[in-house]
Amino acid sequence: MAVAKRKRGGLAERPAKRAKAAPSATEPRDSAAPEEYSIPPPVSQGKWKNKERVLIFSSRGINFRTRHLMQDLRTLMPHSKADTKMDRKDQLFVINEVCEMKNCNKCIFFEAKKKQDLYMWLSNTPQGPSAKFLVQNVHTLAELKMTGNCLRGSRPLLSFDPIFDKEPHYALLKELFIQIFSTPQYHPKSQPFVDHVFTFTVTDERIWFRNYQIIEEDASLVEIGPRFVLNLIKIFQGSFGGPTLYENPHYQSPNMHRRLVRLSVAAKFREKQHVKEVQKIKKQESKVLIKEDPTEVVFETPAEEKPVEIQLVKPESKPIVKDKKKLRKIQRKKQKKLFRTESSV
């Protein structure tokens, strides 16, 4: 093919491209030709059917630990959404409207009171039910120095204590936990791997949440975090309200707990003061004289009488000298005087 010459002041004419001939069906395919590489299809070929979306947000007045815990839950749950903090003056049923605007049917709401007490609401919006917990012993991912590490967005396994199948209120909480914390299959933001476990254990009338990584080599578990303890308060029929289905008889409010601690400290202080007053009264009381016991003289052994020695000459005063060298000099002078007197005699 001749090379097109470039004209001065104008563009070179490009030769027309030849159209590639489609391979005929009867033409035999060359076996020696290399196979063409095609882009692999996406890993999750299934259809996303379980459209569970969880809204995770809080009220104003939370501390840094609660904020980090909330961020950790959003990281572990790819099907969650975030929202701005809710004002304290707003009523809780407003959260149902917020979930509807965010297209969420589950909600985890953190409510802070007195800048030291943290409450967690788990709700199925807008029909219900909902549960209110007191969150205790919070440890976040940044705080815990754990050796485990899991893939971001992977789907977790949920492990429950056997007591969740025995009592009805725990069975209701189990179903609520499954719907909220389990990542839906084929979720766009999730990964098709299962490499960590969420455990819910009931101990001391509380629910203990732990997150463990599954190690493939020996199938052992390594804790990742976060970790917290949920103390159940009430279970409501509706979302953020309604008739009470269950009330925990073992629950003790933080205000009552702090009051009992103060009362115990005050009782110890009052006891110490009472002991001091009793000791003062005993000291001020008149002493009772006990009669002499005639049998006490039986075991007394009289000591030997020593002869009385009368010293006629006044003893010499010993000089008080702190310095030992001066004391030695004085002793030498006295010895010299005695030696002279003896020699003169």
Image (cartoon, rainbow, N blue to C red):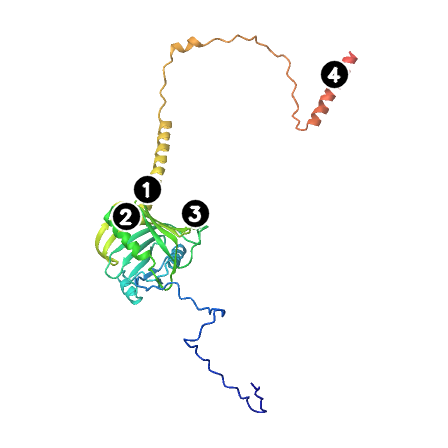
- In the image, residue 149 lies at what x, y percent? 44, 54
Amino acid of disc 3: Asp
As drawn, the residue found furthest toward the left would be 243
Residue beneath the point at 71% across and 23% down: 330
Q: Earlier in the sequence, mark 2 or mark 1?
A: 2
User: Quarter of the image holding residue 183?
Assistant: bottom left
Within 10 Å of disc 4 (Cα), the crowding (few <14, some 14-19, many 20+) is few
Viewer-nearest of discs 3 and 4: 3
Q: Amino acid at mark 1?
A: Leu
* Amino acid at dot 2: Phe
Of the numbered discs in the image, which one, if any, rests on residue 164? Answer: 2
The label nearer to you, 2 versus 3, is: 3
- Work out whether mark 2 precedes mark 4 in sequence or the reverse, and give the earlier one: 2
Image check: 179 left or right of 317?
left
> What amino acid type should be assigned to the residue bearing mark 4?
Leu
Position of 53 with respect to 344 (left or right) is: left
Return the residue at label 3. Answer: 218
Contact (Cβ within 8 Å) of mark 2 with mark 3: no
Circles 3, 1 touching at the beta carbon (< 8 Å): no
Which one is nearer the viewer's eye here, 62 or 123? 123
Front one among 159 and 226: 159
204 in relation to 324, above or below: below
- For marks 3 and 1, the one nearer the N-term is 3
3 or 4: tag closer to the N-terminus: 3
Residue 338 - label: 4
Instruction: Report the disc number at residue 263.
Output: 1
CB under 8 Å between discs 4 and 1:
no
Q: Say whether disc 4 or disc 1 marks the residue closer to the N-terminus.
A: 1
| Gap in angstroms between the C-alphas marked 3 and 1 | 52 Å
